[in-house]
Amino acid sequence: MGCQSRILAVFDNDLARLRATGLGKWLPLWVLIAAMAALTACVGSTESTPIVSKAEANNTLTNDVSSGDGTGGVSDATGSKDLPKISTAETLGDGSSDTVVACSCKGIECGNPPGCPLMNCDACPKGAKCNKNTCESDPNCACGSQDCGILPGCGKDCGGCEAPMQCNVEKAACELDCSCATQECGQVVGCPTSCGKCETGKVCEDFICKPDPKCVCKVGMCEVIPGCPANCGTCAVGEKCVLNKCTAGGEQCLCTNITCGFAKPACVKSCGICQINQICSSNACKTVGSNIKKKFGEPCGPSEECPVPPAGSSQFAQKQFLECQHNQCENGLCIGGICTKKCKMTLDQVNNVTGANEPDGIEDPGQPSECTGAANGPVGATFKCVEQNSPGQVVAGFTDPACLPGSAFTPCATDKTCPAGEVCRVMPFMNGYQSRCAPKVANPIGSPGVKPSQACNPNPSAGPVAMCETGWCKPSGCVGLCEVDADCTTAAGGCKAGQCHANGALCNKDAECPTWTCKPAVQFVDTSLVKFSACQP
């Protein structure tokens, strides 16, 4: 049979079967495939794709098109890989038989099925290539020397960069980020770039502009703090801003021709104190042979020359009383009934209680101190330099340290947390009052001070002096700090001469006098808003 006759025979045979099974829509594809196969047979090619007999091919085609739904597994042009096995006519070299090739994407990830050059299965994803109908990783899609970004042509993300580096997309490399995108101020680390300075009143901290602590206005402050934008406020009519504080009287508080005491009752700053053998009278120092100044560490307080103002006295009378007590001391300072002095803080970088590296307003141990050499008076001879101004004032450059009796000044609520020989006392501390462990206060003659709830008297003009060991004496008796009622012991002898010393009530025995209990919100002094839990009748 000639080449043309064989081709026509194959066409007629398979065309009839395709039409009989309803697969006529595959005719164009079949014609092309069959023509190429027949042409190969005609030129006597000995190379052949997998060959099956014509009968087997007919059976395969019949099985393929005989599915339960009548579609025979044949899909339309939606791209399904499960195409029908198209019969491709081909003859052997001697022309004695016809053969067909079965084309399918089953079990094939990519590329052309063997013997089916016109049929292409799925393509491999980015980053992979097709090798023998299997998708494998493309070695050209490894990040390698690329630091970051998307690998071109592969879609692979090689990751980002760690701060302060940023990804240069063009170079696909991590480079130092010298922009100010992530910081407000300061120098960019490792770069010549400066992100500028903060506005007035702010400081650069962790590359962010934050409010300057020294620019925070405290209660009673006035005028502008150097280096800060905001005014802390103006003073009321009749007051003047002196040393950043509102002072009543303003220019009337000038100390012209005034040697000691206050220029006017409303003034807050004294014009000075007198010498060792002098007292201040009518703003002038007068010599008195018997008035000998007390040394550092010795007692000071009410005396015949410094009588306690009566209850309800004016603020000016109270200030004169305090000034008179200061005048008893050779250093011009009486705090808590003890002559002391101002000092210069040598070093304050460590918390004396916890040991942490933080200032606490107390001179660090082991440093040269100006508070040595005190007389062994009512509170002993151990003193330390302690800041009297607030932390904000200290940051702003306003310091006012003084020598106070004590060592560690451990914060406390009761005596239970204090070491032997010390009690929990209210002390002037950091521009206010705080409860700290400090030495017990003894009487000027050397006898121990009285305990909480016992009768006390710091005024020699009112009778024998009986100092309270806590340094807090009220008309009702010695006051101690507490947390619960059990911390308050009611001393024996509450009834004296037919009266309770706690409240003056008539009595015949101690049991008729009030029992002391722990009460909150007790003021230490009328001029301070700070309150403590203290034992009261």
Image (spheres, rainbow, N blue to C red):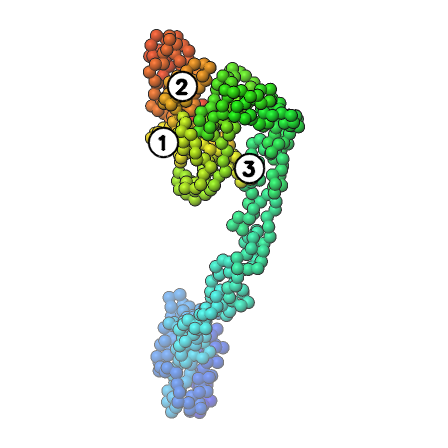
**On the image, numbered disc 3 is attached to which residue?**
398
Amino acid at the residue labelled 1: Cys
The residue under the point 59% across, 43% down is: 201
**On the image, numbered disc 1 is attached to which residue?**
418
Amino acid at the residue labelled 2: Ala
Quadrant of residue 224 in the image? Answer: top right
CA separation, marks 1 and 3? 31 Å
Q: Nearer the viewer, mark 1 or mark 2?
A: 2
Q: Nearer the viewer, mark 3 or mark 2?
A: 2
Q: Return the disc, 1 or 2, that comes first in the chain's sequence.
A: 1
Amino acid at the residue labelled 3: Phe
**On the image, numbered disc 2 is attached to which residue?**
466
Q: Is residue 332 left or right of residue 41?
A: right
Asked if marks 1 and 2 touch (Cβ < 8 Å), the reply is no
Disc 1 crowd, CA 10 A, few/some/many (<14, 14-19, 20+): many
Q: Does dot 1 land on a helix, a strand or a loop?
A: loop
Disc marking residue 1: none
Give the percent coordinates (x, y) of residue 93. Answer: 39, 90
Is residue 151 or residue 412 the one in the foreground?
Answer: 412
Q: Return the disc, 1 or 3, that comes first in the chain's sequence.
A: 3
The residue under the point 37% across, 72% down is: 107
Is residue 81 or residue 348 the one in the foreground?
Answer: 348
Q: Does dot 2 land on a helix, a strand or a loop?
A: loop
